[in-house]
Image (cartoon, helix red, strand yellow):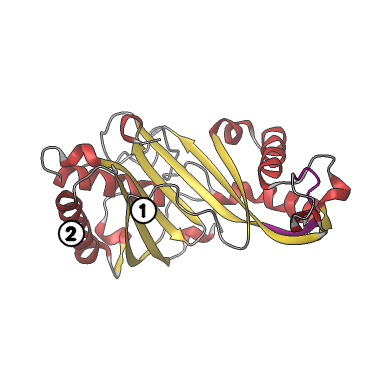
Amino acid sequence: MKPHPVSSTRVAVSDLARGRYSIGDGTFSFAAAHHLTDLPDAENKAGRSHGHTFTVEVELTDTELRAPGFVADYAELATLGEYLKRELDHRDLNAIFTFDTTTDALAQHITAWFLAHMPSERGKQLHAIHVNIGTTTRSPQHTAVDSFAFEAAHHLEGLPDGHKCGRPHGHSYRVDLRLDQQTSPRRRARIRALLAEYLDRQLDHRDLNAVLQFQPTSELVAEHLYAWTLSQAKGQEAAAVQALRVWESPRRWAEFTQDERSGR
């Protein structure tokens, strides 16, 4: 697979049809007090004044990437974090909002704010905003996920001067391979073994810029691993491959799938 050049209007590492890229950023949070008013049970503890650390995850999706291989630069989402810290952090939510401040209602409010205040391109890419209670992002919705890990260094070229991702650095990567839930144990085991061996031999404890012939953004690494897995699948195994997600940190991920295989 030959990569498209950095200057291309379409950045990709495969020729797979109907590809879709997604990223998630769950690094946003705010600590706030509240109580719920619309409760069927008057004895429900949530009706009392209490509080949480609320974690916010933004999910963006697109069919194409922009150089050097981003759905969006995570740094572009900093404005949302600033809003959450300025307006919601260390506040009583009931004193701010007239709606019942459930996590779903807060997600709807933050979504509306995002669409009104963020660049229109980001608004078009917005797939969902999730609000969760606690310091971790939401649990995966799919149970048929096989997870792997590798440790690697990389850097990205063509970024503005001073961008920290242009400096050599590294990540403890996690890879989630989502297969159709009806995949037989035998097929699942074979696909898992192949991917595990590839990650161990080719990417683990390596500099990704030295072993991959493209800009190693998480989006492009996800596409590469998805395409590689498909290329190794035999017969009906290929139909089982639905999506591949690469986590570069516990709260940031990129995923590649094909629309007809997404399983959504």
Can the viewer see residue 47 in this picture?
yes
Q: Amino acid at mark 1?
A: Pro
Q: Which residue is mark 1?
A: 216
Can the viewer see residue 217 in this picture?
no
Q: Amino acid at mark 2?
A: Ala
Tally of numbered discs: 2
Quarter of the view holding residue 43:
bottom right
Q: Is 38 in the magenta?
A: yes
* Residue 190 locus on image (x, y percent): 15, 54
* Residue 189 locus on image (x, y percent): 18, 56
Range shown magenta:
29-39
Nearer-the-camera pick, 244 or 50? 50
Quick one: label 2 or label 1, which is nearer the N terminus?
2
Q: Disc number at residue 99?
A: none
- Left or right of 15? Residue 143 is right
Q: Which residue is mark 2?
A: 193
Residue 250 in the image: above or below residue 259 = below
Residue drawn where x is 43% and y is 38% of the image: 65
- Left or right of 196? Residue 256 is right
